[in-house]
Amino acid sequence: MYLDFSKFNYNLIPTSERELYIKRDKEAYIKILNDWLEKNVNEIVDRKWEIEEILFIDEESDFIKLLKEAESLYEFGFYTSCIALIGTAAEDCTKFFAIRSGAPELTSETQYERLKTMINEDIIGIEQFAVLDEIRKIRNDCVHYNDRFKVKNKEELKKDSLTILNAFKDLIRIFFGFKDAVTLEKYEKIMEYSTKSLVEKDPHIKNFRDLALKQRNIMSQLFNIDLTIKPGVERISKQSIYRIEEIDFDFKEFTLYDMSEMMPVIVDLSVEEIEYFKKIDLKEQEFVYAAITSTVSSSGQTEAWTIIKLNRIEF
């Protein structure tokens, strides 16, 4: 049975009042979704942590887009859809790899024939063939809804989808992963891409907090730098001698350069602080002694820094 009664019969309502009814029902559905998410969020997050990571891939082909969607499907527990999409992504990736290897004629073959030719001509190795062929078999059982697929329970589908999802990601890493050392230019490209994804409302970057979490993880994964605060700490304060790197009263902030840690920190300013700093004619490149404080986010990162105390240093 398929129940498809999400919407009320608005033809029962006078045209002039329908928008009010629709607005009410949408608000009710928002509550349903929030309740569902609250009930299932722990399982969703657990599944997210089951997916292997391959850091970053420069390639922006269609199979990468399909891979991203397949990950989201697994994360939310839609295993059959995940299997079907990974099968499609693996097939598209195989075609892409055949073209890049100088065998474009293979794109018109079936996936089975394509894989056989590719291994016979040493375009792929036996391990890659085994993974791609297993994905092909599981995908075909799923798409054609074969008898052996019909009898699989939820846990078996979960296992299949996670197995081929992680296996396919590992193949992507081997075929297209970044092989050179991570340079500053490469790091800047990654940061630019992640910020662009948020601005363009890429559903795989959910909000600013998600972006900040990914940027934190980038530093730990690529440079072995831990920018987090120990779990359980809710507020952090520090004091040092700073050089005023930049003053931007329009954005209500200034940048202090910590002379002991050799690191900049952006500090938010209140209207009263701005008026006071204007009054004492505080300028860029001056040295100050300051005590600053920040709350710590749920991801262990400092949030907005604010001033507790600031004194100009006269030389």
Image: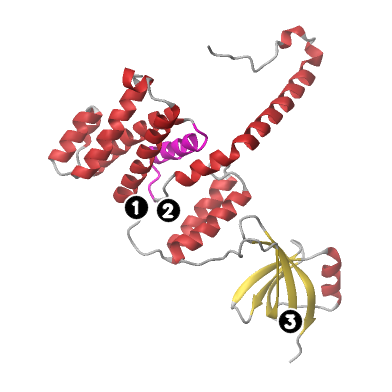
Q: Between disc 3 and disc 1, whose residue precedes? A: 1
**Residue sitting at the far bottom:** 315
Q: Position of residue 95 (x, y in %)?
A: 27, 36
Three-letter amino acid code of the residue under disc 1: Gly
2 or 93: nearer the eye? 2
Three-letter amino acid code of the residue under disc 3: Val
Which mark is on residue 288?
3
Task: Using the rendered view, name the quadrant where residue 132 is placed.
Answer: top left
Range of residues picked out in magenta: 58-77
Mark 3–mark 1 distance (CA, rounded to whole Å): 46 Å
Q: Residue visible at 40% across and 38% down?
A: 162
- Mark 3 and mark 2 residues within 8 Å of each other at the beta carbon: no
Q: Position of residue 167 (x, y in %)?
A: 33, 42
Q: Residue visible at 74% across and 27% down?
A: 27
Q: Between disc 3 and disc 2, whose residue precedes? A: 2
Three-letter amino acid code of the residue under disc 2: Leu
Task: Using the rendered view, name the quadrant where residue 260 is placed.
Answer: bottom right
- Mark 2 and mark 1 residues within 8 Å of each other at the beta carbon: yes
Please name the residue that numbered disc 2 is placed on: 55
Q: Secondary structure at mark 1?
A: loop
Q: Secondary structure at mark 2?
A: loop
**Residue sitting at the far left:** 120
Q: Is residue 248 magenta?
A: no
Which mark is on residue 177?
1
| Residue 273 appears in the rendering | yes
Q: Secondary structure at mark 3?
A: strand
| Residue 124 appears in the rendering | no
196 or 82: nearer the eye? 82
Above or below 278: residue 69:
above
Q: Residues within 10 Å of mark 3 (few under 14, many from 20)?
A: many
Q: Residue visible at 79% across and 20% down?
A: 20
